[in-house]
Image (cartoon, grey):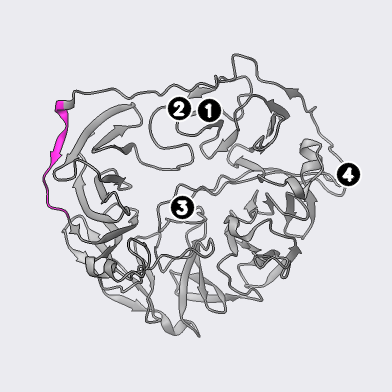
Amino acid sequence: MIKFRSLTWLLVGLLLGSACAQTHSGEEPLVEETAVVEAAAVVEAAAGIEATAPLPTTTPSPTAAAPTAEPTTSPTAVPTSAIRLITDEPIFTGGDLQFVGWSPDGRYLAYFEYTEEQVAESPAEGLRGTYPGTFVFYDTQTGEKCTDYPYSGFFSYEGSDSGAPWRWLPDGQLLLALPDGRLVQTSAPCATETDLTQIFPEPIGSIRATSPNGQKLILQSSSQYWIYDWATQTALPIAEVQPDSFNNLVWSPDSQHISITLAGNYTGDRSPIGGTRVVDVATGAIITQHDWEPANALDGTFGGPVWLNNEEFVVTLSLDQGPFLMNLNGEVQPLLPLLFDETFNPENYWPPLDVYADVENGRYAILRSNEGRDDAAKLYTFTTEGEALELLEGPNVYRLFPDGTVGYGDYSYWSRPIFAADGQFEQRPYGPTPWQLTQNQLFASANSDTIAVFNTATNELVERLQIAGYESGYTLNPLLSPNDQWLAIFINEPRYSLGQALFVIPVPPH
């Protein structure tokens, strides 16, 4: 265990799951995302490492390293004649479509519809995101469309704000910040609403992350962040922090604190420099802070924060200090000198540390990637049995994946369990990429004019689908509901990739 000279910090880790720009435990993302928020755990001494066990440096044996050539694993094939031709009527045809997300129970599909007339009003032909559209909740049980919420369909490219105009609550209700300035809570789309507008002195424009215990959310108005208890319908303002679309707000695992990374320095003049503020959820007050410079406010995460446990979190990247650990007392410790015997170089700062933490089993791993480097990747691991430093050599760029594996790849992936230093790298079966944290047992992919649905548990093909009238030139984008009962298929035309049709069909028994 690594120790500080002034005190010993107990190390545990936390694995945080994703979806929207940042995802958090207990939160259902509004938008399906492949980007993942990584959890982290590290500590260091003020002037060096003091360990209860030695830190061996090991290199994987030749049998443990995967070959650089990566053959593709093919799922069990079925005859082409087994393809099912979909002749159902689409639920939409028109000028364009924008997918938003499935409800957690898989009943409702949220998306934007755009008419041909709206698309034609774009200032440039085929330029997506420049027309308003109609926001839709489609009910798979009734086939009805709820269009009561007039959200704008304009795309937003500014910032990495994980906020959204509406979110599903843990009990299945909806919380919606409406364009007319009202905040309402309802049991289902277009059902009777409870108007919460009077709780706040100004309109709420964005609903951010849900706390890990599911009891609170962060809301954002034009000049204030709020901590909102959806069960009691009460709110508490967060003091002294000006909302910004580039800020990153992350709950502690016990839902008692929020660490806020201030974006800073996206104007290029180092003012403001940015930094970290820690908020006490019970009072809304800032209890500690530290100023540091984000490497690039446009990178989406600004280096964290990523909570290690209820007392500590990690900033995986800063331009002036490198990666560091911070606790609720405001104590800060740099990481590169401790774990990897390296000096931080702001001229060669990318990428940030890659971190995986398993709080339940008291272990964590930190990877100094070999991306853009000539030397090996360095994998530091801590478990209840001790700690180790492993070198991962070869031409591959190694990463830590959210499922607890370390590996590499682009289209096909090779990986092994993070903590199995002597384990062999094996090719992953066909299915979602290792970045996708999903509860789905099924996986759907499109190849040319055919959609294939696979069972990831057995790596077997469930069904092949084609849609009449879209056999050539179109792009098929299949999206399974969280319960694997429905398959939404967005069909895009070849010239501008505008969404021409949307089908929602039941998935066969599997």
The vertical placement of 433 against 249, above or below, is above
Q: Circle 4 sits on which residue? A: 47
Are discs 3 and 2 less than 8 Å apart at CB?
Answer: no
Q: Earlier in the sequence, mark 3 or mark 2?
A: 3
| Quadrant hosting residue 154 | bottom left
Q: Which residue is mark 2?
A: 428
Identify the residue under disc 1: 415
Q: Where are the magenta residues, as a range?
A: 81-90
Q: Amino acid at mark 3?
A: Ala
**Residue for point 75% across, 64% down:** 291
Q: Dividing the image into 4 quarters, which one contains the N terminus?
A: top right
Q: Tell me how far mark 1 sits from mark 2, CA to CA.
A: 7 Å
Q: Are marks 1 and 2 in contact (CB under 8 Å)?
A: yes
Distance from the alpha carbon under mark 3 to that under mark 4: 38 Å
Distance of label 2 from label 4 (alpha carbons): 41 Å
Q: Nearer the viewer, residue 381 or 253?
A: 381
User: Callout 2: helix, strand or loop?
Assistant: loop
Mark 1 or mark 3: which comes first in sequence?
3
Callouts 3 and 4 close, C-beta under 8 Å: no
Secondary structure found at label 1: strand
Q: Nearer the viewer, residue 336 or 79?
A: 79
Q: Measuring 77% from the left and 60% from the top, which residue is drawn there? A: 330
- Residue type at mark 2 is Arg
Based on the picture, tell me whether residue 108 belongs to the magenta stretch: no
> Disc 4 marks which amino acid?
Ala
Ranked by sequence position, the earlier of labels 3 and 4 is 3
Asked whether residue 404 appears in the rendered view, the answer is yes
